[in-house]
Image (cartoon, rainbow, N blue to C red):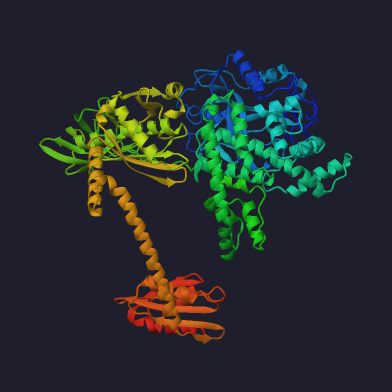
Amino acid sequence: SGFTRQKCAKCDSFFWSTVERELCGDAPCVEYSFIGKPLFSKPMNLDEAREAFLSFFEKHNHTRVPRAPVVARWRNDIYLSIASIAVFQPHVTSGASKPPANPLTISQPCIRLNDLESVGRSGRHLTTFEMMAHHAFNTEEQNIYWQDRTVELCHELYTGLGLPGSEITYKENPWVGGGNGGEALEVLAGGLELATLVFMDLEEDPDGDIELKGIKFKRMPRSIVDTGYGLERLVWASQGTPTIYEAVFPDAVLHLTELTNLKDSLENSSSIISENAKICGVLSIDYGSDLSELRQKVLDRLNAAGHSMTLPEFTSTIEPLEKLFAVVDHSRALAFMFGDGIVPSNVKAGYLARMVLRRTALLLRDLDAQDALSEMVSHHIDTLSGTYPEIGANKAHILDMVALEQERFIQTLERGRRTVQRAIGSGGIDQDKLLELYDSQGLPPSVVSDFASDLGHSIEVPDGFLAMVAERHQGEAKGGKKKTVSIDAEPTNLDFYEDMEKRSFLSEVVFSDIGQISLKNTLFYPEGGGQLSDTGVIAWSGKESQVVEVQKVGDVVVHSLEGETPPVGTQISGTVDDERRSGLSRHHTATHLVGAAARKILGPHVWQAGASKYVDRARLDITHHRRLTRDVIDNLESMVNQLIVEDHPVTTGFHSREDADRKYGNTLYQGGAPNYREVRVVEIPGVDVQACAGTHVSSTSKLEAVKVLRTERIQDGVERIEFSAGPDAIKAAQRERALLEETAEQLGVPIDQAPSAAQKFVKEWKELRNRVSSLEKELASLKSSDLEGEKIGNLTFYAQNQGETDFAEVQKLVRELTSGKDTVAAMGCSKGDSGTVILAKSDSVNLDCGEILKKALSTVGGSGGGKESYAQGACPENKLSAALSEIRDLVS
């Protein structure tokens, strides 16, 4: 084929080329040479480059498959799609299911946040990018193609687009990721990495005999061609612009430069931006790098080329443009994230989306364009909708979430100043505290630094802080191999899937231990999928035991018994508790209907975040960015009950994973990533379809009715809906009616006037409460004026045992006494044999009330403590005077 294996004179890496070369063609061995000198014969935009790639591989017998969402709902170890192969991990790469086509080609939108703060600075980094790929899944039975054909296709693609083959190098660099690994080639031209060709034939195994990059692997029975071609890099290389942003987002960059008055600055800084990108291409600017050192190196190059700039002049020129480029990139990421159903929250993918949005909002604030975020996201939605119409269809929802998140961020900033002040006062702010403030309060480090500066404190913010945060929240931590519990028995036949109406059966005991048995076949449903297990009775030879719990261990169903345990080989008859099973089945089907109605009313971003089904009720947790209003709840309840009246059939069936994916798509997996080769699908045609292992009724009319009991926000971005179905729904409605009638009777008004009467009552109660509070303050003021303080140095010390006095009243008295300057107050009160002591001080007093009270109470058999300004504790009632005396001695 004309390729020879060579060794780079700089980095000693091996690479392949059709001509003799000294260097491998990768940074830092070479610089970008394509800026101003495009690599390809004609410039391409995103749509043109994507279509050129996909159609090329279609012509070479690859099947084009649609993209997956950017939120990786089919996986438990990552939250976002980070590569095209991630779409097929682990189910296809592990051999659990077949690929949708073989070979295939795809252009998969991906999001990576590990280089978040390099975006805009480097000229090449993006948060969102499309990884174009061609994949071949080879097995022992079917060999599609391997290394030689992969390189041949890659070379033909690029040379067909006008890139001379002699300018391409293939650098060897093994790859690991997502639990797999293998040999790999980085495809390089003009100093830019255009693609990576991975030959995946390894899977992680702590006992494996192959090690790559510090991870142990074993050889797989499959060998997978895993390629990744950067769509945006192809576009950039075809245009040769100073940065990738100008090539990929020309209209968005132009619009934002006009909005921020940076258009002239961008046009006049082309050479500066080009040199900056070239240097960044050679040097790593990942988090932890010295940005000032990078700036100086770029400046030295510029001045050597004829510019005459100081470092402050260079920084003031480049930083606004870097922020502008980052905003353009981040706003596209938000369009994809929100368009694909991510709801901002404090956990998982929602946390990452919120982090990107808040960084974008701060960058726009720095550019004095605070109100431009929705406009920029809207621009990207319009641009993307031609290729991805589902993004355009969700435009109103996406912009609603952007607006709401901006409002919440403003509120966070308003509260933030006080939070920072408290943090400084309680020990200062180091890197760990910065992370805590960001995770728990949503305060970005730049904002914390600004607030601290206003308070006269300096805080060091590490470069790449947000990348560190993103890394902490990328996905669930992977552990080692878990020990699996197993039962020495054949897999149990699950008869309840064959007939969910049947309640009695015959079987044989195949495993027996004290209080536990497994059967050859069973109708007892084991706990799982948020549904409680069945209970019932087993009988044999005139004996009977209660089945109190059922669990699945591997493929064996274990029945826990109360009563005698039958031995192996015993023929038994089993009877499932009909009332319990029917209640659980009704509420499981009702959960599917409530979820379907929520998606219909609120939008496709609604996703199941958790569910539990009980005999008399169920709850469903859904992702949604606003509280559920009364109107929404009423509409949801009405829609569900209409579906019940319409009597839709509920069908079930098993499908191979690949068939289920092909027919239903990722929305099938509301309950999480499946772990089975065969997927059981529960479908209410035209209404809902889900992968589900639970029991259900045969038609929606058997639910009779559904009544929403309550809703609540259980965490940011997640709403809980609790409801009852069937006779339990009727009982719930009757209970509500009884409560309303009782309330109306107590208020002495007709039922229809109860709400207004209650409002009037609450208003009057609040007014009385405020009046009582005012009188208590007056009483505290009068008491404080009657107390004589003792002068101890510059302090005025008040102490008194108030006896059997209301604790809240004593608190008000202490607050009144310490509202002045240089005052300390120690007050005691009692209830029965128990005494309480409060110690507080004015802000101007340099004492630690918590420590003083702790020491004083320890001398009289009590305990307590608190903060420097306020503390409280307890001791025996007859020791109160001694405790107050001890406090006085410690204060003096």
Q: Position of residue 45 (x, y in %)?
A: 68, 24
Q: Residue at x 70, y 26 (%)?
A: 235
* Residue that protrudes farthest toward the left in the picture: 542
Q: Position of residue 593 (x, y in %)?
A: 34, 31
Q: Residue at x 57, y 16 (%)?
A: 62
Q: Quadrant of residue 181?
A: top right
Image height of 754 relative to 490, above or below: below
Q: Position of residue 407 (x, y in %)?
A: 55, 45
Q: Residue at x 64, y 39 (%)?
A: 372
Q: Nearer the viewer, residue 342 or 137?
A: 342
* Residue that protrudes farthest toward the right in the picture: 306
Image height of 759 relative to 658, above or below: below
Q: Nearer the viewer, residue 584 or 888?
A: 888
Q: Give the quarter of the figure containing the N terminus.
A: top right
**1 sits left or right of 435 in the view:** right
**618 sits left or right of 449 in the view:** left
Using the rendered image of the protein, determine whether residue 67 is visible from the camera's viewpoint: yes
Using the rendered image of the protein, determine whether residue 534 is visible from the camera's viewpoint: no
| Total marks in image | 0
Q: Quadrant of residue 437?
A: bottom right
Q: Position of residue 87 (x, y in %)?
A: 52, 29
Q: Residue at x 68, y 41 (%)?
A: 118
